[in-house]
Amino acid sequence: VTSGSKKGLVSEEHFCSPFQIPIPSVPAFQPSTPIPERLEAVQRYIRELQYNHTGTQFFEIKKSRPLTGLMDLAKEMTKEALPIKCLEAVILGIYLTNNMTTLDRFPISFKTHFSGNYFRHIVLGVNFGGRYGALGISRREELMYKAPVFRTLSELIFDFEEAYRRCWHTLKKVKLGHCVSHDPHSVEQIEWKHSILDLDKLTREDFRKELERHARDMRLKIGKGTGPPSPTKDRKKDVSSPQRGQASPHRRNSRGDRRPSGEKKPADSKAMPDLNGYQIRV
């Protein structure tokens, strides 16, 4: 509305709020900053973006996209500074820790049951110096950040399980991916579910053994360092198809190489993508 002397006309400057919503600053680190302190800063940044309670998904995340595309999306998230949900927090966590080459990152997905309904959640597992932790966002404080203090992967997962129990949720299934490349230009895909562990079909001890077997697999894959480097944008001409190119150390193994879950994927899984499941109440 333009300003004027007529009654009812108001200067447009009156419509401008005197309060500016602060935009969180992307954390920057000195080379000497310890990794645990960096992780805390990254988690603070993710928390400052706030959890998205609106019911509207601000960023479309396709898990099948190559890593470079997901990193471009994460960069957009930092510019828009909009509220996010758990899957977006995982992508953002990968983006903000890419320069921490001594830090291993891998996705951890949870499926829980409460009051007749199933809920899904995901965090970014981290391993530094042999200690496990997690980055993420949730409505529940105890279902997001975990400092890297857990001696084993099973200790970390059991801590999440106990947190779920305090929320009256029963943990039904855990999906573990392999380590994500630190190359932001890699065209490989994130391996979201190398190990699928169904708690209804595993004893407590078997569950622990499968978790430690997955942790051992990740260590062996990193330790061997076999295979060609991750394909990047600069090498696209040498690869017939980015998604079907030569395997890298972090590419998904064949379906038969995954850890047993005892459960087949439902036939209508395409009609109900995982993304919808992330709109949960935990």
Image (tube, grey):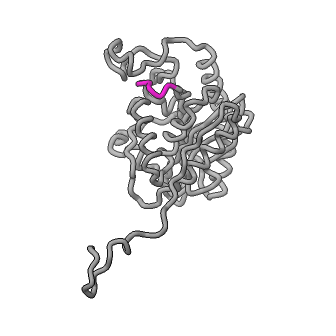
Tally of numbered tags? 0
Q: Quadrant of the C terminus?
A: bottom right
Q: Nearer the viewer, residue 210 or 223?
A: 223
Q: In the image, residue 13 lies at what x, y percent?
A: 36, 71
* Residue 223 shown left or right of residue 243 in the figure: right
Question: Is residue 175 among the parts visible in the rendering?
Answer: no
Give me the residue at 41% from left, 40% from top.
Answer: 73
In which quadrant is the N terminus drawn? bottom left
The location of residue 100, given as percent across then percent down, is: 61, 30
The span picked out in magenta is: 183-187
Vertical arrangement, residue 42 with respect to residue 262, above or below: below
Between 202 and 168, the one nearer to me in the picture: 168
Image quarter of residue 133: top right
Query: Residue at left 50%, top 58%?
Result: 116
Q: Which residue occupies 56% across, 57% down? A: 139
Query: What predominant SS class does the magenta segment belong to?
Result: loop
Percent x, y for residue 219?
A: 64, 22
Residue 32 lies, in percent from the top left, at 70, 32
Q: Is residue 49 above or below residue 262?
A: below
Q: Which quadrant would residue 70 be assigned to in this image?
A: top left
Q: Is residue 83 magenta?
A: no
